[in-house]
Amino acid sequence: MKLHEIRDNDGANRKKKRVARGPGSGKGKTAGRGIKGQKSRSGVALNGYEGGQMPLYRRLPKRGFSKPNRLEFAVINLGQLQGFVDAGKIDANAEVTEDALVASGLVRRKLDGVRLLAKGELSAKLNIAVTGASKAAVEAVEKAGGKVTLTAAAAAAE
């Protein structure tokens, strides 16, 4: 086989059917759209229209509620924190603040604060200052010999 002999399999490429190009094309005059009516015109969007029947989006009940002023926290886990301490990206001797977490790259941005969760293991003795923490996370940090301080933003949120 040579480069100039390579070609598609038979039937792999088909030319696009050109509609409305005269009676000889087989799709002339009305271009396969039938005669008159909304669907024969251009610029028609009938998505969700079921012809007089109650449409699906109106048959289904509305559920739930989205709180417009809800707080969005950046979440970190103990296992992630330990990994960053082991890698030397977080100084275990200094206090671990939200700004330090952002600077280390563990958290991209603070949002409404950082929340500490208990997934993973923590062996380093850390003093952590965050907006929120789960009870299990606080217990795990204290068990490792550290301390969790909740910042003022958490008190205002509760």
Image: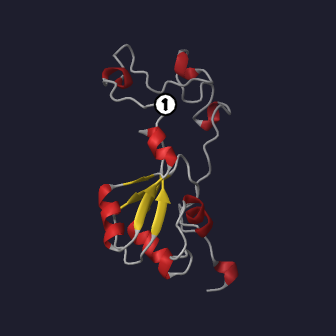
Q: What sort of colour scheme is used for the picture?
A: secondary structure
Is 143 placed above or below 62 here? below
* In this picture, residue 142 sits left or right of residue 69: left
Q: Nearer the viewer, residue 46 or 32?
A: 46
Q: Position of residue 68 (x, y in %)?
A: 49, 30
Q: Residue furthest bottom?
A: 1
The N terminus lies in quadrant:
bottom right
Which residue is label 1 attached to? 68
Is 148 placed above or below 57 here? below
- Name the residue: 47% across, 64% down: 128
Which amino acid lies under the numbered mark 1 shown in the image of this protein? Pro
- Name the residue: 43% across, 25% down: 48
Quick check: can you spot residue 35? no
Q: Position of residue 76 (x, y in %)?
A: 45, 61
Q: Nearer the viewer, residue 109 or 138?
A: 138
Total numbered badges shown on the rendered structure: 1
- Name the residue: 57% across, 35% down: 26
Mark 1 neighbour class, 10 Å CA radius: few under 14, some 14 to 19, many 20 or more: few
